[in-house]
Amino acid sequence: MEFPDLGKYCSEKTCKQLDFLPAKCDMCKQDFCKDHFTYAAHKCPFVSQKDVQVPVCPLCNIAIPIKQGQIPAVVVGDHMDRDCDYCPGKKKEKIFTYRHPLDHSCRHRSRPTIKAG
């Protein structure tokens, strides 16, 4: 072997393959081959600390905290049923502030001379 220090052995117990371009897991800090570098492939014990997602309520746009083991869709659904401040009958802002003069009897400035249709 010409380069004895080149490459590293895969840290997966069932593999131990010599890989010349190993990937280091950013959570457990071990080296893995191309087949075992993903968290799931080497069953990384620290994956729960890395894979943290915070779902957002689609109605009120508030982040909903979830605990480990909870299903995000269920927690967001409970929030929407109980704690959501969104009220569909209450609008915060108008969509249209001005209407076209042909849509109503505008007497403010000038009146259009031709009505459509």
Image (cartoon, rainbow, N blue to C red):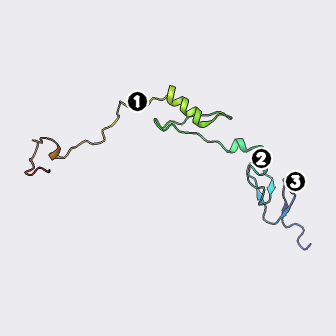
Query: In the figure, is residue 44 to the left or right of 90?
Result: right
Closer to the camera, 115 or 89? Answer: 115
Query: In the figure, is residue 92 to the left or right of 105?
Result: right
Query: In the figure, is residue 114 to the left or right of 16?
Result: left
Residue under the image location 30 percent in, 38 percent down: 94
Q: Residues within 10 Å of mark 1 (few under 14, many from 20)?
A: few
Q: Which mark is residue 44?
A: 2
Image quarter for residue 68? top right
Q: Which mark is residue 14?
A: 3
Amino acid type, residue under disc 3 in the picture: Thr
Q: Going from the N terminus, do you reach mark 2 or mark 1 first?
A: 2
Compared with residue 43, is residue 68 higher up or lower down, i.e. above or below? Answer: above
Residue bearing the label numbered 1 = 87
Amino acid type, residue under disc 1 in the picture: Cys
Q: Going from the N terminus, do you reach mark 1 or mark 3 first?
A: 3
Residue under the image location 71 percent in, 41 percent down: 48
- CA–CA distance in space, label 2 to label 3: 14 Å
